[in-house]
Amino acid sequence: MASLLFETGLAAETPAPNRVVVYAKQDGRIYSKDENGIETLQSNSEVSLLNNLIETNPHPQYLLKNNSRKIEYIQINPTHIIEKKIILDKVPINPQFVQVDLKEGGGPLFFGADFIVQGNELSWDNLEYDYVIEVDDKLRIIYDHN
Protein backbone atom coordinates (compact mmCIF):
# COMPACT_ATOMS: atom_id res chain seq x y z
CA MET A 1 0.00 0.00 0.00
CA ALA A 2 1.34 3.43 -0.92
CA SER A 3 1.38 6.20 1.64
CA LEU A 4 2.53 9.78 2.09
CA LEU A 5 4.28 11.04 5.19
CA PHE A 6 3.79 14.68 6.18
CA GLU A 7 5.61 16.50 8.94
CA THR A 8 3.14 18.64 10.88
CA GLY A 9 3.77 22.31 11.42
CA LEU A 10 2.45 25.77 10.70
CA ALA A 11 0.59 26.72 7.53
CA ALA A 12 2.71 26.63 4.39
CA GLU A 13 3.78 29.75 2.55
CA THR A 14 1.58 30.90 -0.32
CA PRO A 15 2.88 29.17 -3.47
CA ALA A 16 3.90 30.76 -6.76
CA PRO A 17 1.26 31.43 -9.45
CA ASN A 18 -0.33 28.32 -10.98
CA ARG A 19 0.75 26.17 -8.02
CA VAL A 20 -0.96 24.55 -5.02
CA VAL A 21 0.87 23.35 -1.91
CA VAL A 22 -0.36 20.46 0.29
CA TYR A 23 0.75 20.22 3.93
CA ALA A 24 -0.14 18.93 7.40
CA LYS A 25 -0.76 21.36 10.25
CA GLN A 26 -0.24 20.78 13.95
CA ASP A 27 -3.87 19.66 14.30
CA GLY A 28 -2.94 16.54 12.29
CA ARG A 29 -5.12 17.43 9.31
CA ILE A 30 -4.09 17.91 5.68
CA TYR A 31 -4.61 21.29 4.00
CA SER A 32 -3.92 22.88 0.64
CA LYS A 33 -3.18 26.51 -0.18
CA ASP A 34 -3.51 28.11 -3.61
CA GLU A 35 -1.65 31.01 -5.21
CA ASN A 36 -4.12 33.44 -3.64
CA GLY A 37 -3.31 32.21 -0.13
CA ILE A 38 -6.67 30.46 0.28
CA GLU A 39 -6.33 27.50 2.63
CA THR A 40 -8.65 24.51 2.17
CA LEU A 41 -9.10 21.57 4.53
CA GLN A 42 -8.44 18.33 2.62
CA SER A 43 -8.96 15.82 5.44
CA ASN A 44 -11.22 15.43 8.39
CA SER A 45 -11.47 12.95 11.23
CA GLU A 46 -15.19 13.58 11.63
CA VAL A 47 -17.79 11.29 10.05
CA SER A 48 -19.88 14.45 9.64
CA LEU A 49 -17.65 15.48 6.71
CA LEU A 50 -20.08 13.81 4.28
CA ASN A 51 -22.97 15.73 5.83
CA ASN A 52 -21.03 18.96 5.27
CA LEU A 53 -20.35 18.04 1.65
CA ILE A 54 -24.00 17.29 1.03
CA GLU A 55 -25.09 20.61 2.52
CA THR A 56 -22.62 22.51 0.34
CA ASN A 57 -23.76 20.72 -2.84
CA PRO A 58 -20.47 19.07 -3.88
CA HIS A 59 -21.44 18.29 -7.48
CA PRO A 60 -23.31 21.30 -8.87
CA GLN A 61 -22.05 20.60 -12.39
CA TYR A 62 -24.62 17.87 -12.97
CA LEU A 63 -27.53 19.05 -10.84
CA LEU A 64 -30.70 20.23 -12.52
CA LYS A 65 -33.35 22.45 -10.97
CA ASN A 66 -35.93 19.66 -10.76
CA ASN A 67 -33.66 17.01 -9.19
CA SER A 68 -34.44 15.44 -5.85
CA ARG A 69 -31.95 14.22 -3.26
CA LYS A 70 -32.46 10.73 -1.86
CA ILE A 71 -30.95 9.42 1.36
CA GLU A 72 -31.34 5.70 2.02
CA TYR A 73 -30.31 3.86 5.16
CA ILE A 74 -29.60 0.18 4.57
CA GLN A 75 -28.69 -2.49 7.11
CA ILE A 76 -26.77 -5.28 5.38
CA ASN A 77 -28.45 -8.67 5.63
CA PRO A 78 -27.29 -12.14 4.46
CA THR A 79 -29.12 -11.76 1.13
CA HIS A 80 -27.18 -8.58 0.35
CA ILE A 81 -23.92 -10.41 1.05
CA ILE A 82 -24.86 -13.43 -1.10
CA GLU A 83 -26.10 -11.28 -4.01
CA LYS A 84 -23.32 -8.68 -3.50
CA LYS A 85 -25.71 -5.85 -4.25
CA ILE A 86 -28.38 -3.50 -3.00
CA ILE A 87 -31.32 -2.28 -5.07
CA LEU A 88 -31.79 1.48 -4.62
CA ASP A 89 -35.25 3.05 -4.51
CA LYS A 90 -34.45 5.37 -7.44
CA VAL A 91 -31.96 5.54 -10.33
CA PRO A 92 -29.15 8.02 -9.56
CA ILE A 93 -28.57 10.77 -12.13
CA ASN A 94 -24.83 10.15 -12.10
CA PRO A 95 -23.59 6.86 -10.58
CA GLN A 96 -20.12 8.31 -9.94
CA PHE A 97 -21.61 10.84 -7.52
CA VAL A 98 -23.43 8.33 -5.33
CA GLN A 99 -22.07 8.79 -1.81
CA VAL A 100 -21.94 5.77 0.48
CA ASP A 101 -20.69 5.76 4.03
CA LEU A 102 -20.67 3.24 6.84
CA LYS A 103 -22.55 4.46 9.88
CA GLU A 104 -21.01 4.56 13.34
CA GLY A 105 -17.54 5.77 12.39
CA GLY A 106 -16.85 3.42 9.49
CA GLY A 107 -16.10 6.19 7.01
CA PRO A 108 -16.86 6.54 3.30
CA LEU A 109 -16.85 3.90 0.58
CA PHE A 110 -15.50 4.97 -2.81
CA PHE A 111 -17.08 4.57 -6.26
CA GLY A 112 -15.02 2.29 -8.48
CA ALA A 113 -12.83 0.99 -5.64
CA ASP A 114 -15.45 -0.22 -3.14
CA PHE A 115 -18.68 -0.27 -5.18
CA ILE A 116 -20.23 0.54 -8.56
CA VAL A 117 -23.71 1.65 -9.56
CA GLN A 118 -25.56 0.53 -12.68
CA GLY A 119 -29.14 1.73 -12.99
CA ASN A 120 -30.57 1.39 -9.49
CA GLU A 121 -28.20 -1.44 -8.50
CA LEU A 122 -25.30 -0.72 -6.15
CA SER A 123 -22.88 -3.68 -6.17
CA TRP A 124 -19.47 -4.57 -4.77
CA ASP A 125 -18.67 -7.92 -6.45
CA ASN A 126 -14.86 -8.39 -6.43
CA LEU A 127 -14.32 -4.83 -5.20
CA GLU A 128 -12.77 -3.73 -1.89
CA TYR A 129 -16.03 -3.67 0.09
CA ASP A 130 -16.59 -7.32 -0.92
CA TYR A 131 -13.71 -8.32 1.36
CA VAL A 132 -14.87 -6.47 4.49
CA ILE A 133 -18.67 -6.45 4.31
CA GLU A 134 -20.46 -7.89 7.33
CA VAL A 135 -24.06 -8.63 8.23
CA ASP A 136 -25.55 -5.67 10.13
CA ASP A 137 -23.23 -3.06 8.52
CA LYS A 138 -25.27 0.13 8.32
CA LEU A 139 -24.91 2.13 5.12
CA ARG A 140 -26.04 5.64 4.31
CA ILE A 141 -26.47 6.10 0.57
CA ILE A 142 -26.98 9.59 -0.83
CA TYR A 143 -27.69 10.44 -4.46
CA ASP A 144 -29.66 12.77 -6.69
CA HIS A 145 -32.38 11.50 -9.01
CA ASN A 146 -35.00 12.92 -11.37
Image (spheres, rainbow, N blue to C red):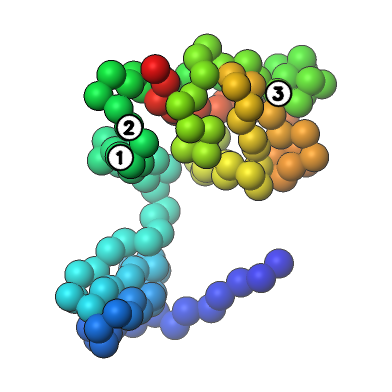
Q: Secondary structure at mark 1?
A: helix
Please, what is the three-letter code of the amino acid marked with disc 3?
Lys
- In the rendering, which numbered label is found on residue 80? none
Of the numbered discs 1 and 3, the one sitting upstream in the chain is 1
Of the numbered discs 2 and 3, the one sitting upstream in the chain is 2
Viewer can see residue 4: yes
Q: Are marks 2 and 1 in contact (CB under 8 Å)?
A: yes
**144 or 127, which is in the foreground?**
144
Question: x and y percent of residue 119 in the render?
Answer: 60, 22
Please, what is the three-letter code of the amino acid marked with disc 2?
Leu
Q: Residue at x 55, y 27 (%)?
A: 139
Q: Residue at x 50, y 14 (%)?
A: 90
Please, what is the three-letter code of the amino acid marked with disc 1?
Pro
Q: Which residue is mark 2?
A: 63
Please, is residue 46 above or below residue 86 in the view? Answer: below
Q: Secondary structure at mark 3?
A: strand
Q: Specify whether 116 is left or right of 29.
A: right
CA separation, marks 1 and 3? 28 Å
Question: x and y percent of residue 67 in the render?
Answer: 33, 21
Please, is residue 41 above or below residue 57 in the view? Answer: below
Q: Are marks 1 and 3 in contact (CB under 8 Å)?
A: no
Q: Specify whether 30 is left or right of 40.
A: right
- In the rendering, which numbered label is found on residue 60? 1
- In the rendering, which numbered label is found on residue 85? 3
Q: Secondary structure at mark 2?
A: loop
